[in-house]
Image (spheres, rainbow, N blue to C red):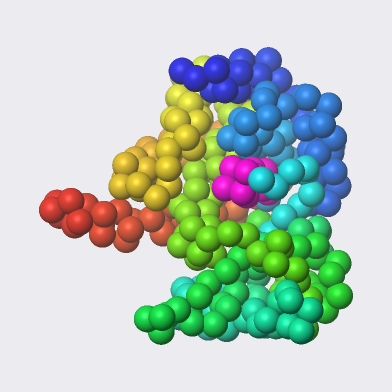
């Protein structure tokens, strides 16, 4: 067990039955950031902070926020501070490089100009910093040159409009972003291929952090309402598993296959939680029944796992 995992488990055993005041997402995020800066979380390590935020959550949307923000911290290690960040990839046409139409063009000032529309801004108006995937011309082979720009959401030419609440996690906010002649400096473009080096690895990493945070939330509920120490023990084991998965390079077959197996094990444990948390207060029970669907995001990796096994010469069952 790593030092980070040990600190996380020790913190959960001492603190998980405490709560944070209920509130909307901006209010909860403010409280979470305060806990983070006051060293009330188990560690500054992103996966530990994700689990800690899950245990502090009052609903699945809060746990999701903790997982998502700490996944960004893990993927983009040069980004400091606790500002809310959003990675903007998806467009109306899709999210693969061929489907990305948001564009970066050189401007007369020696920098770049950004134009386009992104379908999802996680956090909506809560977003303070944006990471935007865009294409900047073509490579020699005709493929789009993908870059990732990082800049403040209050930049001139940026407009974020709220989207209607989703059926799952309605407390979580989303928005649509429009970029109209947004000026950017060269240093605001993150080095490397914006898709292959950043967006794609984050997609693999994100589910690990969100599952870990949701398990932290379920551990708190199990301590408070289930009365089952064996269930709490298995949740701690699963959280330890995700701590290990978070340390893997998401670009490797090992991480791809181990993560898919981890999600399958976690899914079985979540099903057990459904049966064991029968004494939840009605509002919490009903919200969990509605929001547990977010864990289906783990199924998105099944196709990648099948492809990875095929590359290893094995047919996935």
Q: Residue at x 62, y 81 (%)?
A: 103
Q: Residue at x 72, y 33 (%)?
A: 56
Position of 70 compared to 156: left or right? left
Question: Which sits in the foreground, 211 or 135?
Answer: 135
User: Mainly helix, strand or loop, the magenta region?
Assistant: helix
Q: Determine the image quadrant of residue 218.
A: top right
Total marks in image: 0
Residue 193: x %, y % from top left = 50, 64
Q: Is residue 171 visible?
A: no
Question: Which sits in the foreground, 56 or 30?
Answer: 30
Position of 260 compared to 66: left or right? left
- Is residue 72 on the magenta stretch? yes
Quick check: 161 above or below 49? Answer: below
Question: Which sits in the foreground, 316 or 58?
Answer: 316
Residue 281: x %, y % from top left = 69, 38
Stretch in magenta? 64-77
Position of 257 compared to 121: left or right? left
Position of 103 compared to 268: left or right? right
Q: Determine the image quadrant of residue 140.
A: bottom left
Q: Residue at x 53, y 72 (%)?
A: 146
Q: Determine the image quadrant of residue 38.
A: top right
Q: Is residue 8 visible?
A: yes
Q: Residue at x 63, y 43 (%)?
A: 77
- Is residue 233 on the magenta stretch? no
Residue 289: x %, y % from top left = 57, 50
Residue 136: x %, y % from top left = 58, 78
């Amino acid at each position: 067990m790593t030092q980070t995992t040990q600190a996380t488990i020790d913190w959960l055993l001492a603190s998980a039955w405490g709560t944070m005041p209920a509130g909307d997402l901006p209010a909860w995020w403010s409280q979470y950031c305060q806990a983070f800066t006051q060293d009330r979380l188990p560690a500054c390590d992103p996966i530990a902070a994700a689990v800690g935020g899950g245990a502090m959550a009052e609903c699945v949307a809060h746990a999701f926020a903790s997982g998502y923000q700490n996944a960004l911290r893990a993927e983009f290690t040069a980004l400091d501070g606790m500002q809310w960040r959003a990675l903007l990839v998806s467009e109306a046409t899709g999210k693969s490089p061929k489907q990305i139409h948001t564009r970066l063009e050189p401007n007369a000032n020696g920098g770049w100009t950004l134009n386009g529309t992104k379908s999802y801004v996680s956090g909506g108006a809560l977003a303070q910093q944006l990471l935007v995937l865009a294409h900047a011309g073509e490579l020699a082979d005709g493929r789009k040159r993908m870059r990732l720009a990082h800049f403040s959401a209050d930049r001139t030419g940026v407009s974020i409009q709220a989207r209607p609440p989703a059926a799952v996690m309605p407390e979580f906010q989303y928005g649509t972003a429009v970029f109209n002649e947004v000026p950017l400096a060269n240093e605001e473009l993150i080095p490397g291929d914006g898709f292959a080096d950043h967006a794609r690895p984050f997609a693999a990493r994100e589910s690990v952090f969100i599952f870990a945070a949701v398990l932290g939330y379920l551990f708190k509920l199990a301590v408070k309402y289930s009365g089952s120490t064996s269930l709490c023990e298995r949740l701690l084991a699963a959280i330890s598993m995700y701590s290990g998965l978070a340390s893997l390079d998401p670009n490797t077959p090992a991480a791809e296959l181990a993560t898919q197996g981890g999600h399958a094990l976690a899914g079985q444990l979540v099903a057990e939680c459904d049966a064991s948390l029968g004494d939840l207060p009605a509002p919490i029970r009903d919200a969990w029944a509605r929001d547990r669907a977010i864990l289906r995001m783990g199924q998105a990796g099944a196709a990648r796992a099948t492809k990875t096994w095929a590359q290893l010469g094995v047919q996935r069952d």
